[in-house]
Amino acid sequence: MSQTSLAEEKLDVSELYAEKGRYCQFVQKRDGSYVLEPVKVPAHVKAARAEQRRRREMQRHARDNRERAQAVNARSAVFLAAALGFFVMVCCVFLAMQNQVCSRSNQITSLITQISELAEENDSTEKRIAASENLLEIETIAREKLGMQYVDETQIEYYAADDSDYMLQYDDIE
């Protein structure tokens, strides 16, 4: 036999070997030709093939599970949309409250500024009035026009209070 016929024969053998479950070997006949004869599949090969089938099946199940887990169904889409809407609503409420706090803080600052300005104005007016008063003139007006007098010793009443005791006053002392 020539080299090419042997190569062609090997191609045919590889095609036969590709069939599932077949386990073959080349056997040389007495005339020098080669024949492909099926042989019994060894137990370790059967076990290895069964393990490969089991692994492929597990990988297929895992891939299917991953695809199912990654798929967005209608219920999860509605849940995600509701969660997003709730989140946006919470953010809007937060921003509105923060805006209110800032505006009220600005109002408080302006009111504090107004109070301090009015207090300064009140103090300056009080000092101006106090500076413009003449105490001698006030005393003269009180004695002459209003008939007021200084207090004499007969009008003053003294009382002593004990430190551990207390006193309630219901009427003015005359």
Image (tube, grey):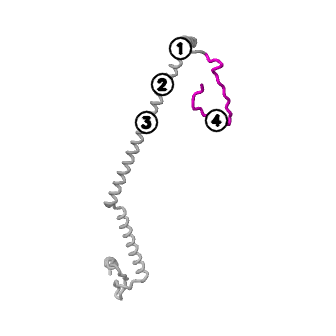
Q: Which residue is mark 3?
A: 104
Kindly state the secondary structure of the residue where label 2 is placed. helix
Label 2 vs label 1, nearer the camera? 1
Label 3 vs label 2, nearer the camera? 2
Q: Residue at the location (52% across, 22% down)?
A: 123
> Which label is found at residue 118?
2
Q: Which residue is mark 1?
A: 146
- Pick whichever, 84 or 51, lies toward us: 84
Q: Residue at the location (54% across, 12% down)?
A: 141
- In the rendered image, residue 45, in percent from the top left (x then y), is placed at 41, 80
Amino acid type indicated by mark 1: Leu
Mark 1–mark 3 Cα distance, whole angstroms, equals 52 Å
Q: Earlier in the sequence, mark 3 or mark 2?
A: 3
Q: Earlier in the sequence, mark 1 or mark 3?
A: 3
> Which label is found at residue 174?
none
Q: Residue at the location (37% across, 51% down)?
A: 86
- In the rendered image, residue 47, in percent from the top left (x then y), is placed at 42, 80
- Pick whichever, 47 or 171, lies toward us: 171
Q: Quadrant of the N terminus?
A: bottom left
Q: Quadrant of residue 59?
A: bottom left
The residue carrying pointer 3 sits among few (fewer than 14), some (14 to 19) or many (20 or more) residues within 10 Å by Cα, namely few
Kindly state the secondary structure of the residue where label 1 is placed. loop
Q: Which residue is mark 4?
A: 166
Question: Is the C-beta separation of discs 1 and 4 under 8 Å?
Answer: no
The magenta-colored residue range is 150-174
